[in-house]
Amino acid sequence: MSLHVDRTGSGPDLVLLHGWGLHSGAWDGAIPLLSGCFRVHALDLPGHGRSAASHAATFDDAVGAVAAAMPRDGVVCGWSLGGLFAQRLARDHPERVRALALVGATPCFVERDGWSAAMAPGTFGEFEAGLQRDVKGTLERFVRLAALNGADARAAIRLLSQRLAERGAPDAVGLARALGWLRDTDLRDDARSLAQPAVVIHGRSDALAPVDAGRWLAGSLPNARMVELDGCAHVPFLTHRDAFVRALESLHG
């Protein structure tokens, strides 16, 4: 399986893993700043962007494909779905993950017994049903929720929508498969074994991954610190770019 990767800059390696429905272009506003001190590898996840034709049957297969496209010993920054990838990479491919940045991330996106910092199963089920009926409308709903309650919400929605359209229509099969990974993956049991230095970057107004999920990660990872952002929803790299970049620069090493 061959995944698309855009590379730019110089310095220690930084791998950027985007969220569901988007592609590596989601990071375009931050990459010029990050590439001043990192060698940036912006990767399109399986079934997304320019990796749309690359399908993985399972989440672990997808993680393996991402690992094969990455450098060794880099900082891995995962946003949303990309945060699940980053956590599993840190467990299964520690030689490739020197440090972690988890952005709008959670170990588990859907509520379970003993886990309320997540989306209700009924709400998630509506997303899945909507995707079967109307891919475009479901992606538009995701974009709105990603910016909901945050600063400059309208501007964030416009920018995310523009980014979404830049690489053509997403692959419906890949989107459905990745949505299943969001529904089924629960990485809570792994957190205390991830010893890499980590920064958890989370908006206090995040409507897709509640801030309590980020707080749980920061409290459970052995070597993590939390960056909470006021007036920030699910897209801090868009609406709070300078704070996001500073947090990643703290992992420069």
Image: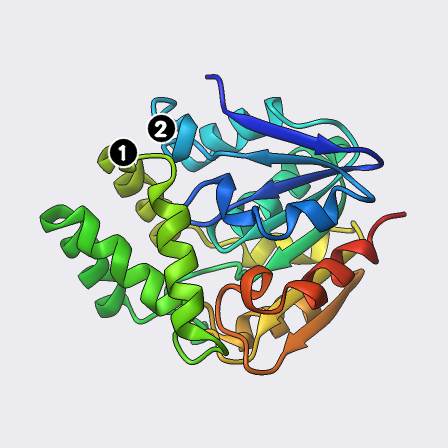
Q: How many marks?
A: 2
Q: Are marks 2 and 1 in contact (CB under 8 Å)?
A: yes
* Residue 225 lies in quadrant: bottom right
Query: Gap in Å between the C-alphas at discs 2 and 1?
Result: 6 Å
174 and 30: which is toward the camera: 30
Compared with 126, 211 (above or below) is below
Which structural element holds mark 2?
loop
Badge 2 crowding class, 10 Å Cα cut-off, few under 14, some 14 to 19, many 20 or more, is: many
Q: Amino acid at mark 1?
A: Asp
Residue topped by disc 2: 52
* Viewer-closest of 167 and 131: 167
Assign a secondary structure to mark 1. Answer: loop
Q: Is residue 159 left or right of residue 106?
A: left
Residue type at the position of mark 2? Ala
The residue shown at (50%, 78%) is 151
Residue 64's spot in the image, x, y percent?
A: 54, 27
Percent x, y for residue 34? 73, 47
Q: Does residue 111 show up?
A: no
**121 to 116, vertically: above or below:** above
Residue 65 in the figure: left or right of residue 122? right
Q: Is residue 221 left or right of residue 128?
A: right
List x then y, in percent, for residue 109: 42, 61
Name the spot of residue 120 as percent of width and height, x first. Answer: 30, 71
Mark 1, residue position: 171
